[in-house]
Image (cartoon, rainbow, N blue to C red):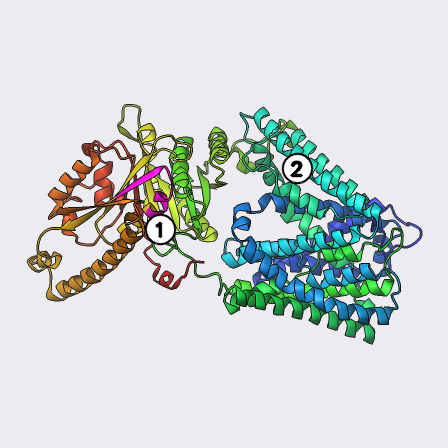
Amino acid sequence: MEGTENLMCRSGDSFNPWVTSSFQVSCILVTSHIFHILLKPLGQPGPFAQLLAGVVVGPTLLSRISDVKDFFIQASSAEYYMFFSFLCRMLFMFSIGLETDIPYLKRNIRVVSIVAGGGSILACIFSGPLLWLLIKVFNVNEHQLTFYLLIFTVLANSASPVVLRMIAETKSDTADLGRLAMYTSLFNEMSCVVIVSMLTSFTSSQRFQRALLVVAVTGTVIILNKYLSLFFSRRNRNNRFVTNSEIFIIMFLLTSVSVILENTGYTSITCCFLVGLMFPRECKTCRTLLHKLTYAVNTFILPVYFGYAGFQFDITNIFNKLTIVLTVIIILLSAGTRIVGTLAACYYLKIPRSESLILALLLNMKGNYDLIIINTPPVPGKLWEEDIHDLFVSVVILNTLIIAPVVALLLNRDVCFAHYPTTLEILNPESELRMLACVYIPRQVSGHVSLVSALGGCQNAPIKPYLVHLVELPKKRKSKLMYHQLEDGDQYSDEEEYGGNDLIEISDALDSFISETKILVHQSKIVSSLQTIDQDVCESAKDLRVAIVFLPFHRHQRIDGKMENTMEEIRTINHKVIRDAPCSVGIFVDRGHTGFQQPHGSLSVQNIATFFFGGPDDREALACSKRMLMHSQVNLTVFRFIQTSSSMHNSWINNASHKDEEVIMAISTAGAENEIDNAFVDTFYNRYVAQGQASLVEKHVSNGAETVAAIREILEEMYSLVIVGKGGRRNCPLTTGLSDWEECPELGSVGDLLASPEMNFNGSLLVIQRHRHSEADEDFIAP
């Protein structure tokens, strides 16, 4: 590979280079974890600690000791260090491609490209004067185009691995600003790679032919992976993961192609990223790769890669006035062009100023492709002059070490990430809906993915669905086999034995759903005791920033149509989640083959009814229904129940149990609720009913008995799903008496009535409770 020589090489090896390089990797890994443990309470992320660990182990500190220096820095060891960096870079770029949210990138490609281009355009402009200055200072008479590309890359590039890890460790990867920063940095870095590669490919016919080879090889690997992944998945139909040998084939193919590309003079990071990006998501192979790579990349590979970047920095190289001045100028110019350009782009896109500043600082992170360019010789066998190399390495490392703590403090303040929609009512119908579906057993999966299918039926209303498998932590641990006793494909992890065959069935059901609907559902698992699993669900909902959580009902329908208890503990867990959830909650009563079916791919239209009595829960139920009616295979009818007697507050006044103050407060509250309900229904009517997309039927009733009669009449029609709010309006005369024989209070009075066998209703039921503590959400404006 080109660029494997380094300025730190010395003639003669006192020790085996494999030993020294392996020991150096171990020292960097241990030191970075120690620094991460010490700095994490201060809010500093992993990349900062890992860069700092490399600086400490490197020539700046520990390697200044002569014995350590002789051991670490040898004539041949640099080649091994570069090889380790190449392997790390290949694996984490492939992993980044696998984890990329393609639907988000498609929807926001305009915003991402504008923000990325804002700073890059200014960097391209200011690289010219800086080129003239550095040519005069270092007397560069050859390879001036390559030198310009080096300067441009250092000014314009954003190190996507650094940005992604900082966003992930501050739990901002589910926030809009966090995702925008992640994909803008990726777009920016890939753009820099493409620009530099294209310009250098036109310098000679040989390099142009190599560029065509790179494109052809990358496309071939993408096509091969598509067929290999599907073939491996079919071979392991009864397993959750594919075998280790099959993963080895995928990784061997990726490594071979990367080595070929590096030997042609082009970096392999774009190829690895594209191979991961285009890898089929709806198969066991992708799940296995993510399972095996994610932990290794975050725990071992990235710390070593960032640590080696810091290891290249030697503070003694800037101990002269000229180098200090040039370093300061380049750092200020890099930060200035990125901040000004990003702020201008954000102003054009109307992004808030506080978020724009954080975004600009995040995109100013360095330490990936820029270091590759710095360590790549302008011509084979000839490195950059030592002072040029040291100057740009110092700029890259110092820039990141200075900005990373500032960005971490801003991200940890949660100023820009605190507010997100926790209810469907305030969420824009065209904005992304984030939801979390919880299942305990495989039979619950079909009903929940049917809800996901209905809610994701329109491209103009994107969704981000998560499905979590809730597994009870057993009191007794099973005995474990030794690692060499495991069969091929088995995982040496205590957690993998939890879930058993249920996990395989759930994974297979999701794979089929994703393949059929092209809706990517992110699968995870929570293993906890039943006493605390509700806390884990609420914490997951908060971290994922979902607007609604769907829970399964504790009963399931038998073959004869009767409802039977699945697990009584589920009912207790549902009560706790309803009480503590940081968002709206829906309890889904699935009726199996007679209930709600997946709209995607269905020849029959799913008829849905929504009961609206008034109040926040019913408005939330109607908001959920609005999302579903966008599906072409869904027919929605909203039944609004209206009181026929004089007025609601007269019944309270005639009730002797109420005090005067309570009557006045009730009248005021009822009036305010009425206004909100009327406005919400009017908006729904004008937008959907008037356009012929839904139906609205008014049912005039005066008491609970008439309400029950009206509901029975409605259910005579064939509805596969009924959606209703849990609470309705407080003290509503229309539901008076319905709760006298209430069996499942978590469903509310109307929901409990619909779930009871007396109603003889064979359709599914969705009962929704609006988030109770979302007053601050009223100020939220959906993007």
Q: Mark 2 = which residue? A: 222
Q: Quadrant of residue 638?
A: top left
In space, the residues marked 1 and 2 are separated at their CA atoms by 41 Å
Question: Percent x, y for residue 722?
Answer: 27, 40
Residue at x 74% of width, y 55% of height? 196
- In the image, taking residue 724 as reference, residue 544 lies left or right, namely right
Secondary structure category for the residue under label 1: strand
Name the amino acid, label 2: Ile
Magenta segment boundaries in residue numbering? 626-637
| Circle 2 crowding by C-alpha within 10 Å: few under 14, some 14–19, many from 20 | many
**Residue 721 drawn in magenta:** no
Depth check: give the residue in front, 35 or 134.
Answer: 134
- In the image, taking residue 713 as reference, residue 361 lies left or right, namely right
Secondary structure category for the residue under label 2: helix
Name the amino acid, label 1: Ser
Figure check: 576 above or below 470: below
- In the image, taking residue 671 as reference, residue 71 lies left or right, namely right
Q: Mark 1 = which residue? A: 584
Q: Are marks 1 and 2 in contact (CB under 8 Å)?
A: no
* Viewer-side label of 1, 2: 2
Label 1 vs 2, first from the N-terminus? 2
Could you tell me if residue 358 is visible in this image? yes
Question: Percent x, y for residue 545?
Answer: 45, 53
Question: Percent x, y for residue 183?
Answer: 59, 54
Image label count: 2
Depth check: give the residue in front, 325 or 676.
Answer: 676
Question: Percent x, y for residue 315?
Answer: 79, 67
